[in-house]
């Protein structure tokens, strides 16, 4: 199985740049803080504690060079796993929240990705709980960069404190600008949050795991060919799923809902995409043939223009 998973060409469709930063790299960026402190930062009492840690990592990325460094590190790890294609989510909403200029940061990460064995596209992500105006600013940044590898716009963060209904106009704007649409939903809230994201026009759902509780929603996702971006380790570490055997990946897959496997925040969760495939095999009995079809979904549901 290890050789099979290594040889399998893989794609990452749900992968946050900031969440990919390992504690050792944070220590490199901020040598005054012991690495143990950063390791402790990467333990989460609950989902909100994870969101706070994510923002703390964002604050430690101070310059375009810092962003370029973490992009390099991420792409090296992806290439070593035979990940051929990645849509990397950049928390542009956090960059603006820090009061930074997004342009030089994006130019730096884009440059850092050139020459990598991994084909890269970018998704700019707004933070739900920061509100509509901030989300629109991110959509504008994304719209300006559709010719520079930005393929999609998304929202993440707290479903509770930033309901999907707020973002109707923002998603309509992003769509008109030629961006593809995704939303984190059904992660820390129930299926109603996934329905609300679909109402916005989301073409893929980040997590969407609580869809498993709603047979009508499962039918809808299958009938409309809308994939769920599943990240098993993430759900356990942030506590939205309490224990491994309660994860609904098998239910979703068996219901015929398209799924893709992803690492989400590999630095912050100490996981990798290959590990997620291994976990799916070990804990949920996915066969090699099933894992191959899931890996193919990573390319099939990519937002890049088909070449
Ligand atoms: Zn995510």
Image: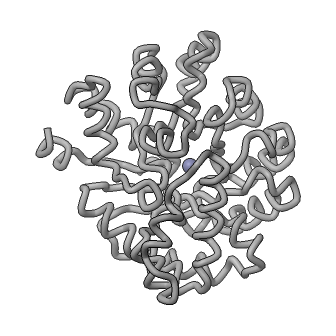
**Location of residue 249 with respect to 87 vertically, above or below:** above
Q: Who's the residue at 57% across and 80% down the image?
A: 107
Number of numbered markers: 0
Q: Where is residue 180 in the image (x, y as percent from the top left)?
A: 63, 47
- Please name whichever residue, 142 or 177, is drawn nearer the observer in this view of the structure: 142
Residue located 82% across and 50% down the image: 170
Residue 63 percent across, percent down from the top left? 60, 86
Residue 102: which quarter of the image?
bottom right
> In the image shown, does 137 or 276 lie closer to the viewer?
276
Q: In this view, does 47 lie above or below 251?
A: below
Q: Most extreme residue toward the top, as rendered?
A: 215
Identified at 32% across, 39% down, the residue is 295
Q: Quadrant of the N terminus?
A: top left
- Image vertical order of residue 2 relative to residue 95, above or below: above
- The residue under the point 69% across, 32% down is 189
Q: Where is residue 230 in the image (x, y as percent from the top left)?
A: 47, 37
Residue 199 location (% of width, % of height): 76, 30
Looking at the picture, the colour scheme in use is one colour
Quadrant of the image occupied by residue 207: top right
């Amino acid at each position: 199985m290890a050789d099979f998973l290594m040889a399998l060409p893989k794609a990452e469709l749900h992968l946050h740049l900031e969440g990919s930063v390992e504690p050792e790299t944070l220590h490199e960026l901020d040598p005054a803080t012991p690495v143990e402190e950063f390791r402790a930062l990467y333990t989460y009492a609950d989902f909100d504690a994870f969101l706070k840690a994510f923002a703390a990592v964002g604050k430690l990325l101070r310059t375009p060079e810092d962003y370029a460094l973490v992009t390099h590190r991420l792409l090296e790890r992806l290439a070593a796993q035979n990940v051929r294609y990645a849509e990397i989510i950049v928390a542009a909403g956090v960059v603006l929240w820090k009061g930074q200029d997004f342009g030089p940061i994006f130019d730096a990460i884009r440059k850092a990705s050139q020459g990598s064995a991994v084909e890269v596209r970018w998704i700019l992500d707004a933070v739900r709980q920061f509100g509509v105006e901030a989300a629109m600013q991110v959509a504008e940044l994304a719209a300006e960069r559709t010719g520079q590898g930005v393929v999609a716009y998304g929202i993440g963060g707290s479903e509770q404190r930033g309901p999907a209904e707020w973002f109707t106009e923002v998603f309509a704007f992003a769509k008109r600008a030629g961006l593809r649409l995704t939303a984190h939903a059904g992660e820390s809230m129930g299926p109603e949050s996934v329905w609300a994201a679909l109402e916005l026009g989301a073409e893929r759902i980040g997590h969407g795991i609580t869809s498993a509780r709603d047979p009508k929603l499962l039918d809808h996702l299958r009938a409309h060919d809308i994939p769920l971006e599943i990240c098993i380790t993430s759900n356990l570490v942030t506590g939205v799923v309490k224990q491994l055997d309660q994860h609904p990946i098998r239910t979703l897959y068996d219901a015929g809902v398209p799924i893709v496997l992803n690492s989400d925040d590999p630095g912050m969760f100490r996981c990798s995409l290959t590990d997620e495939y291994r976990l799916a095999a070990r804990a949920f009995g996915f066969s090699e043939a099933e894992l191959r079809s899931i890996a193919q979904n990573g390319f099939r549901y990519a937002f890049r223009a088909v070449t």
